[in-house]
Amino acid sequence: MKKLYILILRSYLGPLILTFFIALFILVMQFLWKYIDDLVGKGLQWQVIGELLFYASTTFVPLALPLAILLSSLMTFGNLGERYELVAIKSAGISLRTVMKPLVVLSVLISIFAFFFSNNILPVTNLKFKSILYDVRQQKLALNIREGIFYNGIEGYTMRIGKKEKDGVTIRDIMIYDHTSRMGNTTVTRAEWGRMEQSADGATLDLTLYNGYNYDEKTDRRNERNRPFQRTYFAEQYRRFDLSDFKMMRTNEELFRNHYQMLNLKQLTQAEDSLLRETDMRLSGLLRSTEISYSFNNQLDSAYMSRIPDTLKPVNRLPVISSLDKTGTLQVYELALNAARNTKSNIEFNKADIEARLVLIRKHQVEWHRKFTLSIACLVLFFIG
């Protein structure tokens, strides 16, 4: 019987591992096609790309593992039936339930591991993956100054290079617009040739310009017609540009830690309870503020209310209003109208806030149940296969 169990397990584990990595590879390729525009042309290091793909592939395990179990179970029992091995096993007096026993035990163990993975590992990988993906998407395109094309990737400057020499350092026919003063194209630098080099750490771009002019158009806000023009010749000029914006800055992961996809079962329960308490407090505060605005509703004379006829005829005004003149009455109506408008705005604002909190609570509940879906899917798809 042990040899039979080993045969069944070997027939099952091979297709399981193969289909799992094939499904995972397809999902990672889909991820690359989806975010290809956010990855290309930013000069990302291989370490960052490898880390991003590793965490992305980890988040795809809940999709790849049930699919692998389904396909491997189909392939295993299909091959056993095609080669008449199941017939030989049954003719030996061994039932199908006995044949499935090792695979059922293995599927239960995989389901237990899947639950542990969903509850403990997946929230951490989601946190790492979302934070790296956010940093990559916020990353600026790498410095790429091409010949004859205006480049404005460096903040506050626009430059054009007429020609680059083969050494990649010497440049000719340089034009630089300085927009740091935010006064338009009032400061321009032109040079016949120069040298362009990046620092060793890539933090700065160093330009050494030769045989050029600085053009500066002064502006006088008190007299727009008075715009003196200044031109200065230089034999050599050194310019340094800050490239710190082109470096990938890592965001603090604590900013994403409270997201429902980054929480385990215990944390989801605590977060849901906190959201429910906050929602109840918000609703109670809304009711209290409404009662304060219309406190006279509770103070109306019940006898007076009972005397209001149930018809469409207008009722007599309150005695307080009846004692006022026309101007006072209009002021009272205006105050009442403003109070009603303010209360309506307050109710609409709190309604939108409470509805958003309820949606967030439902997302926490869905994520709480999702922790069990991977384990259940592994078992169900095994028996389906």
Image: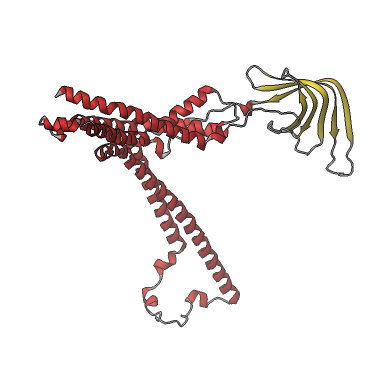
Q: Is residue 139 visible?
A: yes
Quadrant placement of the C terminus? top left
Q: Classify residue 273 as left or right of residue 136.
A: left
The foreground one among 223 and 16 is 16
Q: Classify residue 315 as left or right of residue 116.
A: right
* Residue in the picture at 40% in, 50% down: 358
The foreground one among 362 and 284 is 362
Quadrant placement of the N terminus? top left
Q: Position of residue 45 (x, y in %)?
A: 55, 23
Name the quadrant containing residue 7.
top left
The foreground one among 254 and 13 is 13
* Residue in the picture at 40% in, 38% down: 261
Q: Position of residue 57 (x, y in %)?
A: 42, 30
Q: Position of residue 308 (x, y in %)?
A: 40, 79
Name the quadrant containing residue 139.
top right
Q: Classify residue 187 as left or right of residue 349.
A: right
* Residue in the picture at 71% in, 25% down: 241
Asked if residue 127 is positioned above or below residue 204 in the image, the reply reads below
Q: Classify residue 324 as left or right of residue 238.
A: left
The foreground one among 108 and 268 is 108
